[in-house]
């Protein structure tokens, strides 16, 4: 059954050469249940709120299957949270999710797919690339992962099942909206 393997929140704000001067991309798994509110996971932050976070980007999910692809491609470990995701998933193709699709996670939380991640220069720097190579490569593979808005608040924990409860037939998928 599809499930959340890890819930990640910011571990530390890191210095960054971008306009804001710091980044909150350093997300790491936490133990135990995590409250999910309108703006995402409790204890998580976004340093650049102009481009990240808000109601339509409350949570970001990335699939373990896609992380495994990148681990093979890059010959390095891609631990949960490393790409800045809040939710590491297993057993669901997050890039096939349709905009407007709703998932129930655990017993109470309901989220709705809003858009794909658009890779940024902060992400490139995290990957050791000060140019545009990583951004283009990540986008070209079209393994972006979705952002979600929170429809129903609650608490989730690692291991909680993901149940797709509503799928709009005519909406584009995350893959369709990819920027490759």
Image (spheres, rainbow, N blue to C red):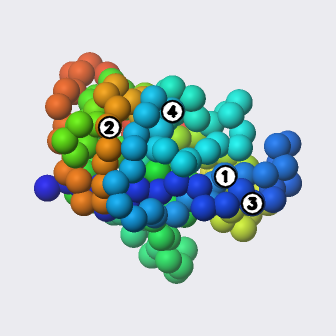
Q: How many marks can you see? A: 4
Comes first in the chain, label 1 or label 2:
1
Tell me the element at label 2: strand
SS under mark 4: loop
Judge by depth and name the residue closer to the eye, 49 or 95: 49
- Kind of element beneath mark 3: strand
Q: Quadrant of the N terminus?
A: bottom left
Q: Is residue 147 left or right of residue 124?
A: left
Q: Earlier in the sequence, mark 2 or mark 3?
A: 3
Asked whether 7 or 131 is in front, the reply is 7
Residue behind mark 2: 154
- Against 69, is 59 above or below? above
Q: Which residue is mark 3?
A: 14
Left or right of residue 104, residue 35 in this image: right
The location of residue 63, given as percent across then percent down, is 36, 56
The quadrant of the image that shows the C terminus is top right
For marks 4 and 1, the one nearer the N-term is: 1
Q: CA distance from mark 1 to mark 2?
A: 23 Å
In this view, 150 is above or below 118: above
Seen at 45% across and 29% down, the residue is 38
């Amino acid at each position: 059954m599809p499930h959340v393997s890890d819930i990640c929140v910011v571990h530390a704000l890191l210095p960054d050469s971008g306009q804001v001067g710091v980044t909150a991309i350093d997300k790491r798994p936490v133990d135990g249940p995590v409250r999910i509110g309108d703006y995402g996971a409790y204890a998580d932050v976004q340093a650049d709120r102009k481009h990240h976070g808000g109601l339509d980007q409350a949570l970001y999910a990335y699939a373990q299957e896609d992380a495994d692809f990148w681990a093979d491609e890059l010959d390095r470990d891609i631990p949960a949270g490393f790409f800045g995701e809040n939710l590491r998933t297993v057993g669901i193709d997050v890039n096939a999710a349709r905009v407007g699709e709703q998932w129930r996670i655990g017993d109470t939380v309901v989220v709705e797919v809003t858009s794909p991640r658009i890779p940024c220069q902060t992400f490139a720097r995290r990957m050791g690339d000060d140019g545009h190579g990583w951004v283009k490569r990540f986008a070209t593979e079209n393994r972006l992962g979705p952002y979600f808005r929170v429809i129903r608040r609650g608490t989730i924990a690692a291991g909680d099942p993901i149940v797709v409860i509503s799928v709009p037939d005519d909406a584009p998928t995350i893959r369709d909206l990819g920027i490759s």
